[in-house]
Image (tube, coloured by chain):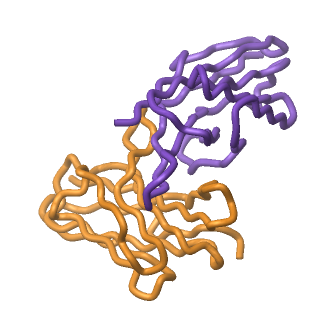
Amino acid sequence: DTGVSQDPRHKITKRGQNVTFRCDPISEHNRLYWYRQTLGQGPEFLTYFQNEAQLEKSRLLSDRFSAERPKGSFSTLEIQRTEQGDSAMYLCASSSPDSHNEQFFGPGTRLTVL
Amino acid sequence: ELKVEQNPLFLSMQEGKNYTIYCNYSTTSDRLYWYRQDPGKSLESLFVLLSNGAVKQEGRLMASLDTKARLSTLHITAAVHDLSATYFCAVDKLGGSNYKLTFGKGTLLTVNP
């Protein structure tokens, strides 16, 4: 396993369309995080899974956003009725209980909403 | 709410010079993380600092943590062009069931020949 992977790497969509991103964490990591990063800012926390349980959602995550991790392995992040303000880099990270919460990030999915 | 402040936000330095990036955070946390991000790329973990007085070094970078002052520093020694990148510090809040990281805004480092 070479690290966290994300798909797609880039997504261009029109306002109002739905999009879905996928994240595959490092295989032995049971913790999975989604962050959003806009230009010139640090990543902002969106949501966190421990195994298949979604334990916290940020206030940034409106009801248009939903995330799942059905079998405690890969995760998906769906954005419904996209808005231009959703344009950002969406980053996935994973960690293991033994790693002092050192989080390893994937390459990200860059979303552009036209 | 946990807040993390970095300074400077922009740093332009010459090769061979030394400089320090500062990271202050607002509430008690015993773990601090430094990441590097190259343009258009994801974040690479550099250091994990786990206790007061922790110091870690890798090549020309050295990070330290003072939990009493809620301050971490990233010191750059004899900078080289390859160190040009954005550097983020992040903290997590001990306790509870969420291990989310709160990041600073980042320091954009440019090392000039």
Residue B50 to residue B108: above or below = below
Quarter of the image with the N terminus of chain B is top left
> Percent x, y for residue B21?
64, 20
Question: Above or below — where is B109 with respect to B102?
Answer: above
* Chain A color in figure: orange
- Residue farthest along the bottom direction in this orientation: A71
Residue B80 lies in quadrant: top right
Residue at 71% from the left image edge and 71% from the top image edge: A2
Residue A113 in the image: state x and y as whole percent.
Answer: 24, 54
Q: Chain drawn purple, letter? A: B
Q: Which quarter of the figure is the C terminus of chain B placed in?
A: top right
Q: In this view of the protein, which residue sits in the foreground, B27 or A31?
A: B27
- Residue drawn at (53%, 40%) of the image: B91
In the foreground, B106 or B26: B26
- Who's the residue at 71% across and 20% down the image? B111
Compared across the picture, whether A107 is left or right of A85 comes to right
Residue A60 spot, x, y in % from top left: 25, 50
